[in-house]
Image: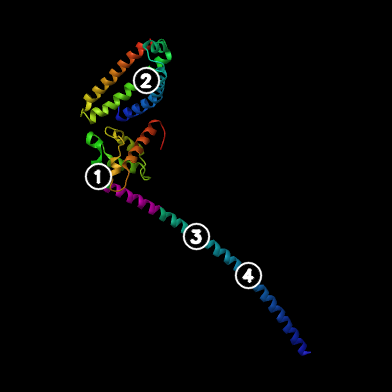
Amino acid sequence: MSEFHLYMAQRLSALVMAPFVIVHIGVMIYAIQGGLSAAEILGRTQGSAFWFAFYGMFVVAVSIHAAIGLRTILGEWAGLRGGMRDGVSALIGLGLFALGAQAVWAVTA
Amino acid sequence: MKRTAVIIVLLILLILSAGTNTYLYLNNEEAMAQKELELISMRDSMQRELMRMEDSLDAIVQSLQEENQMLANKVTELEGDCYSACDTVAGNPDYLGPAALQRAWTLYNDVKDANKDAILDAVSGKGGCHSCHSMGSCTTYCPNELDPLSAILGLKRATAKRFFGGRK
């Protein structure tokens, strides 16, 4: 994957995330009105195909976006180069995806 | 009798002369009109020729101005203030830097350069225009009042448009 394709992937994932972030924050503000409980959250999300798709896509976009951004920081700030830098950022991306997917599965399944 | 004959002859001559003069006068009028038409068409063709010359002069002046701008850009590249002001240059040894990318943007916009794809390919690789973080020190410190930041943004935009199949 070329630098240019990484650049496009990061921009496009940002485009996908923008409405997700707005809805995510909006629902957070709405959900904490009158207290916050795990039961209330799970009541909304469990068995919901909508929230599974919403947070599923969100997690995919975040993993792509953050891994590419951290790859740049690893190069410019930590001085990692070549395969080391690509490998570490790919691991970060996979790790974010694994953690996120697990969380989505836990609250929507 | 003899006198009458002379008067008649003189009268005839007078009439003839008046007729001839009238004929010559009318003829002359026509010739003048003809000449005027010729003059008008001559004037028009000269005007056209002048306009053509003006146009080609304009083209020459424009290409000289472009040449001048390119030379000014080259001088800036040699000065390299934008390059040393750039934090991305400091952090990323592969980065082409603002001066080279400014030059690429100038070439990309040069009407005399037909191979725009090759320019976009050259700035899309490792350390190309997409490595820029748009911090803008290059534009702030440019000694020639150039704007490498906008040039790099232009290159990014052009490559993204090409990616989606659009043209400039």
> What is the crowding at mark 1: few (fewer than 14 residues within 10 Å), some, or many (at least 20)?
many
- Residue that badge 2 annotates: A58
Q: Amino acid type of disc 1?
A: Asp
Nearer to me, B157 or B142: B142
Q: Is residue B74 left or right of residue A31?
A: left
Chain under numbered label 2: A
Q: Please give the label number shown on residue B47.
A: 3
Callout 1 secondary element: helix
The residues tagged by marks 3 and 4 sit, at their Cα atoms, a distance apart of 27 Å
The residues tagged by marks 2 and 1 sit, at their Cα atoms, a distance apart of 42 Å
The answer to whether residue B137 is seen in the rendering is yes
Magenta region includes residue B65: yes
Point 26% across, 20% down: residue: A91
The residues tagged by marks 3 and 2 sit, at their Cα atoms, a distance apart of 69 Å
Chain under numbered label 1: B
Q: Amino acid type of disc 3?
A: Gln
Which segment did they paint magenta?
Answer: B59-75
> What is the crowding at mark 4: few (fewer than 14 residues within 10 Å), some, or many (at least 20)?
few
Chain under numbered label 4: B
Do the residues under discs 4 and 1 have CB atoms within 8 angstroms? no
Magenta region includes residue B29: no
Q: Residue A43 location in percent, x, y?
A: 41, 10
Nearer to me, B38 or B119: B119
The answer to whether residue B93 is seen in the rendering is no
Q: Please give the label number shown on residue B29.
A: 4
- Residue that badge 1 annotates: B81
Q: Is residue B129 left or right of residue A27?
A: left
